[in-house]
Image: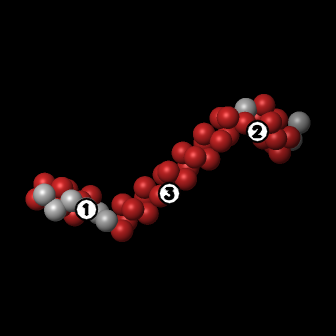
């Protein structure tokens, strides 16, 4: 059995797990992009100085 067949079998057998993995990957990418645009130290300064949002 080839690797492609194994992956297709896993996807068809566990669609909820695949959906969860895709959602987790999207959240990770969005979180990384936000982290690059707004570094954590800048956010912390706004939160602790009362200037949040």
Which one is in front in this view, the residue at disc 1 or the one at disc 2? 1
Query: Is the C terminus in the top left, top right, bottom left or bottom right quadrant?
Result: bottom left
Measured Cα–Cα span from mark 1 to mark 3: 22 Å
Camera-side residue of 1 and 29: 29
The residue indicated by pointer 2 is: 11
**Coloration of the structure image:** secondary structure
Residue at the spot 13% in from the left edge and 57% down from the top edge? 50
Secondary structure type for disc 2? helix
Residue at the spot 62% in from the left edge and 47% down from the top edge? 22
Secondary structure type for disc 1? loop
Camera-side residue of 3 and 35: 35
Does any portion of residue 50 appear in the rendered image? Answer: yes
Sort mark 3 into few (<14), some (14-19) or many (20+) by Cα contacts within 10 Å. few
Name above or below for residue 19 compared with residue 39: above
Which residue of the protein is positioned furthest toward the right in this rendering? 1
Q: Viewed as shown, does residue 3 lie left or right of 51? A: right
Q: Viewed as shown, does residue 43 lie left or right of 49? A: right
Does any portion of residue 6 appear in the rendered image? Answer: no
Which one is in front in this view, the residue at disc 1 or the one at disc 3? 1
x and y, in percent, of residue 6 in the image: 81, 37
Name above or below for residue 44 compared with residue 4: below
Q: Viewed as shown, does residue 40 lie left or right of 3? A: left
Measured Cα–Cα span from mark 3 to mark 2: 22 Å
The residue indicated by pointer 3 is: 29
x and y, in percent, of residue 33 in the image: 43, 63
Count how many numbered circles sit on residues in the image: 3
Q: Mark number for residue 53?
A: 1
Query: Is the N terminus in the top left, top right, bottom left or bottom right quadrant?
Result: top right
Residue at the spot 31% in from the left edge and 65% down from the top edge? 38
Which mark is first along the chain, 2 or 1? 2
Measured Cα–Cα span from mark 1 to mark 2: 41 Å
Q: Viewed as shown, does residue 24 lie left or right of 42? A: right
């Amino acid at each position: 059995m080839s690797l492609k067949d194994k992956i297709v079998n896993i996807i068809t057998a566990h669609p909820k797990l695949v959906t969860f993995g895709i959602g987790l990957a999207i959240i990770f990418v969005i979180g990384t992009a936000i982290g690059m645009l707004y570094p954590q130290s800048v956010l912390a300064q706004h939160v602790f100085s009362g200037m949040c949002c």
